[in-house]
Amino acid sequence: MGEMLIGTCSWTDKALVGSGWYPPGRRDPEGRLRHYAERFPVVEVDAGYYALPSVRNSTLWAERTPPDFRFDVKAFSLLTGHPTRKAALPADLRGYEAGDPELLDEVWHRFGAALRPLGEAGRLGAVLFQFPPWFAPGARAETVLHRIRKRAPRWPLAVEFRHPDWWGDDRRERTAALLRDVDATAVAVDTAQGLPGSMPPVTPVTSSRLGVVRFHGRSAAWGTGSKEDRFRHAYTREELRAWLPRLRSLADRVEQLHVLFNNCCGDAAVRAAETLSDLLDPDETAPRDTRPRSVSPT
């Protein structure tokens, strides 16, 4: 069985910081990360979607975490075709129009430079490309994925689709084959079912090195409400227990499995991560110092 790393999709989310989960004396940026890393072995840098990470911050993250800790960095919005506000760009890039190829090239360059300290320190677990709901299956989308791999030949890519057709019964095998072809991990998700934007509850394996599961909560406002409403859910032990067979099956087929909670309301995500860890047998996670080192991006 591969190693299962359990964590959350942010350690800096305002709702978590305001929940009281961080104790007095550990509420500055360094203290929060050290406190988190003492309790979980992996975290997602969700903030990378909203603003380009910096080389300085990545260097500090590596310095403030153990050698076996992993960061899964979410790709900046411009790289996945999401609307990107000019204010989210560095000041010197705000004069470009959104579709300018020079802007895209420079953003790719800066995003890659920011990942490098994590890769060189062995902390980079995955680079998550979460595509928008309108990113539908087809030749154009397949070309986009191949171009991403060409731009980032050594990144540990993980891909999450938000258009349900990618994992529909008639498309599932082709989608899995596409991700294998670009050497990317298929991200499995847990969301509310029965809604127009609900993703099929499938757990495909497209890379023997890495699996990723993201728990978004089961809010009825998924895909329609505010951020708080979409992710407002407190997982019960029974809901998490039902996932154990699938998680164990995934872990049997990959070297390392990242399980990340994105139900980011108050401390709900860290509590769910703690509960899932409690439900697993102690020997289902390998010793921290045996975790495989990540690939350094170039």
Image: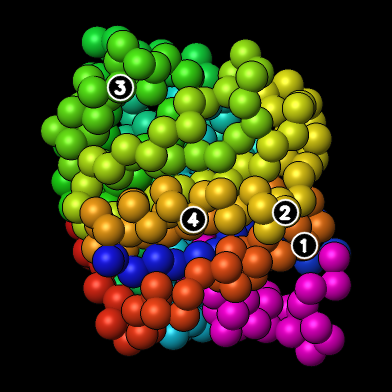
Asked whether residue 126 is in view, the answer is no
For mark 4, does the 10 Å Cα neighbourhood hold few (<14), some (14 to 19), or many (20 or more) residues? Answer: some
What residue does disc 3 label? 172
User: Is residue 85 found left or right of 171 in the rendered image?
Assistant: right
| Residue 202 seen anywhere in this rendered image of the structure | yes
- Earlier in the chain: of badge 2 and badge 3, it is 3
Query: In this rendering, which labeled residue sits more in front, label 4 or label 3?
Result: 4
The numbered mark at residue 236 is 2
Instruction: Indicate which disc, 2 or 1, sits on the residue closer to the N terminus.
Output: 2
Question: Is residue 10 found left or right of 205 in the rendered image?
Answer: right
Amino acid on which the number 3 mark rests in the picture = Arg
Residue displayed at 31% across by 11% down: 170
Q: Secondary structure at mark 4?
A: helix
Q: Is residue 63 above or below residue 188?
A: below
Is 254 or 16 nearer to us in this picture?
A: 254
- The nearer-to-camera label among 3 and 1 is 3
The residue depicted at 47 percent of the width and 75 percent of the height is 281
Disc 4 from disc 1: Cα separation: 22 Å
Q: Which residues are magenta?
A: 19-44
Mark 1 residue type: Asp
Gap in Å between the C-alphas at discs 2 and 1?
14 Å
Label 2 and label 4: CA atoms lie apart by 13 Å
Front position among marks 4 and 1: 4
